[in-house]
Amino acid sequence: MLPGRFLYDSMFGIDRMEDMSCDIYEKDNVYHLEMDIPGFTRDDIKIECHKGTITVSAEKNVEKDESDEEKKYIRRERKCGKYKRSFYLGDIDEDSIKAEFKNGTLLITAPIKEESLKKEITIESED
């Protein structure tokens, strides 16, 4: 089960959450974050972890060429700018976090620390 303070976003006003859709689930004591970041390369994306919070940021600048000055855009939807999202996951093994970026989808796996897992306590008999 995910911690109560599970995620927070839009801390600095630069987030564009609709451009970074994310699914988070837990399976076999590992959190999995699957985030869509289309149009970016691996080098555009930065992942940081601090005290159980994973922050994903991406920055994309418009590439201009000499012919841009001649262009009169009717509509421009291809986005550029800074994107950032943070997720608090709790007591995770920060040294074992892995990330993979393929076909515009970022997959981060963050194992839960063994000592933070629930343990069942056996009641001893009175005899």
Image (spheres, rainbow, N blue to C red):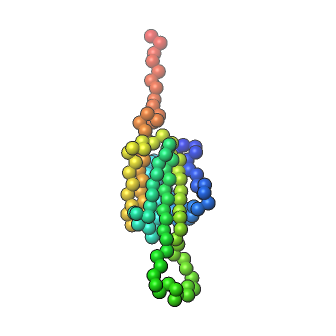
Query: What residue do we see at 39% from left, 54% from top?
Result: 99
Residue 92 location, x and y as percent?
A: 45, 42
| Residue at the extreme top | 127
Q: How many labels does the image show?
A: 0
Query: What residue do we see at 49% from left, 56% from top?
Result: 56
Query: What residue do we see at 41% from left, 36% from top?
Result: 114
Residue 102 location, x and y as percent?
A: 37, 63
71 in relation to 116, above or below: below
94 in relation to 21, above or below: above
Residue 34 location, x and y as percent?
A: 45, 57
Can you see residue 56? yes
- Decide which of 110, 49 is in the foreground and name it: 49
- Decide which of 54, 109 is in the foreground and name it: 54
- Decide which of 26, 18 is in the foreground and name it: 18
Residue 25 location, x and y as percent?
A: 47, 51
- Dividing the picture into quadrants, the one containing residue 72 is bottom right
- Decide which of 97, 121 is in the foreground and name it: 97
Can you see residue 1? no
106 in relation to 96, above or below: below
Query: What residue do we see at 50% from left, 53% from top?
Result: 55
Quadrant location of the C terminus?
Answer: top left
17 in relation to 89, above or below: below
